[in-house]
Amino acid sequence: MPKECRRKSSKDPGPDRARSERRAAGKPSSSSSVCDELAQAAALVAPPPAMHALPVPQVTITPEGGGSAREILPEDLTQHPVDGLLSRKLSSSSLSSAGSVESEDDVLSDNETKSKGIVTLEHLLDTGEVKPWWKLKTYIRSPLNTIYRRKLNWVQLAGHKGNFKAADEGTILKKFSENEMQCFEKLRDDELRPFVPGYHGVVEKDGESFLQMTDLLVNFDHPNVMDCKMGVRTYLEEELVRARERPKPREDLYRKMVEVDEGGPTPEEHRQRGVTKPRYMQWRETMSSTNTLGFRIEGIKKHDGSCRTDFKKTRSKQDIIKVFKDFVGGDASIIKSYLHRLTEIRQTLNTSEFFKCHEVIGSSLLFIHDSTGKAQIWIIDFGKTTGLPEGQTLSHDVPWQEGNREDGYLWGLENLFHMLESISNEETGCFVTTESDL
């Protein structure tokens, strides 16, 4: 084994080191390539040498195209050893880490989130016949000592494919938006700064520009995440005006409308199998609680990897309350923590100069909690938040009429607060719901 290789891999665990040495002995290989393999293995899976042997994490194989998942047991690993090294891979999935949320308005977002304890792996070496659609997802449940717990790389949970990339530990990269950058620059000196992701400037990666922001999930263990899109509309007035300039019926929008509600299109739209963009934009808001309550639930990703994104027709208070109860798993203390945070956000919005002079469209509240009882809410997504002409302000709590630019943000926030408050006031024995209730 080359000397330089031994120096780099001196801390590698026995099995991985022995396997790499066998590779090196089995076929001619440059010392640099062997060292690279060992370095990758050490960075990905090697615990410190002083640690005792840990239980094998549960591994589940799930076919992307459907089919049932099965768990890989420790004996499977013994009987069918995998020769190839594994590395973490940025997931293109969205808010579930398992299901996808693709929305016309840069949804989730948000989103500035990360999967901790759930890792998607891919083979770097050819290990024979491996079906390309298999994904390995590890759910690490062993109680590691905190000082030895290796923080996992950030994984994209939401938004359009390519919007997010992993960055240095504790941060993420979001695709550059001039509008969002200007918002973060202004928020640096605003009272809302403690309630938005930390902003670390613009960086270049792979030939593209990104905004570097704090990873909001870095301090949570196996977090549960909910994205709530705030306001009475998710499109700017100028988007509506531009859409009217070319009111051509579009078949793709017709299909989207029919998928949600077969009775949505008019007889004429059914006949021509097309819906104009202005019509679709306004219809979409009427289907969810965006129109009735001033916010809507975009998606939920739980600590176990399960995901729900089927909220396009969730409109009533009762339905949303059931969703929130299920989200917190019957833990009233989590609801109280969320209420405390919402109170702070509401008070700060009322005094924020940034909020007064901006039309806040497509922004979300990101709810996060874990099994330790830690809970937090952040204001995220400023890609469509637009400054008003100098001297103009918005109240954010009056009805929108085209031309007044009101977004209904505070009205939605008030409705959201009262719903959580009603949950908190219920007796614990009546608090828990089951999936059949949802």
Image (cartoon, grey):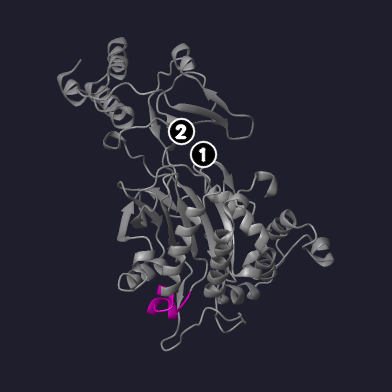
> Residue 152 shows which numbered tag?
none
The crowd level at tag 1 (other Cα within 10 Å; few <14, some 14-19, many 20+) is: few
For residue 356: magenta?
yes
The residue type indicated by label 1 comes to Asp
The residue type indicated by label 2 comes to Tyr
Residue 331, image x, y percentages: 52, 50
Residue in front for this viewpoint, 215 or 219: 219
199 with respect to 162 (left or right): left
Q: Earlier in the sequence, mark 1 or mark 2?
A: 2
246 with respect to 167 (left or right): right
Q: Mark 1 and mark 2: span between their CA atoms?
A: 8 Å
Task: Look at the image and tell me whether residue 142 can be seen.
Answer: yes
Determine whether label 1 and label 2 are within 8 Å by CB: yes
Q: Tell me the SS state at disc 2.
A: strand
299 to 303, vertically: above or below: below
- Identify which residue is drawn at 68% across, 71% down: 247
The crowd level at tag 2 (other Cα within 10 Å; few <14, some 14-19, many 20+) is: some
In the figure, residue 357 lies in which quadrant? bottom left
> Residue 304 shows which numbered tag?
1
Give, as a single range, the part of the protein colored magenta: 348-359
Residue 116, image x, y percentages: 41, 42
For residue 82: magenta?
no
Task: Look at the image and tell me whether residue 312 can be seen.
Answer: no
Residue 394, image x, y percentages: 49, 82
- Identify which residue is drawn at 43% across, 78% down: 350
Residue in front for this viewpoint, 196 or 279: 196
Total tally of numbered discs in the picture: 2
308 with respect to 176 (left or right): right
Return the residue at label 2. 139
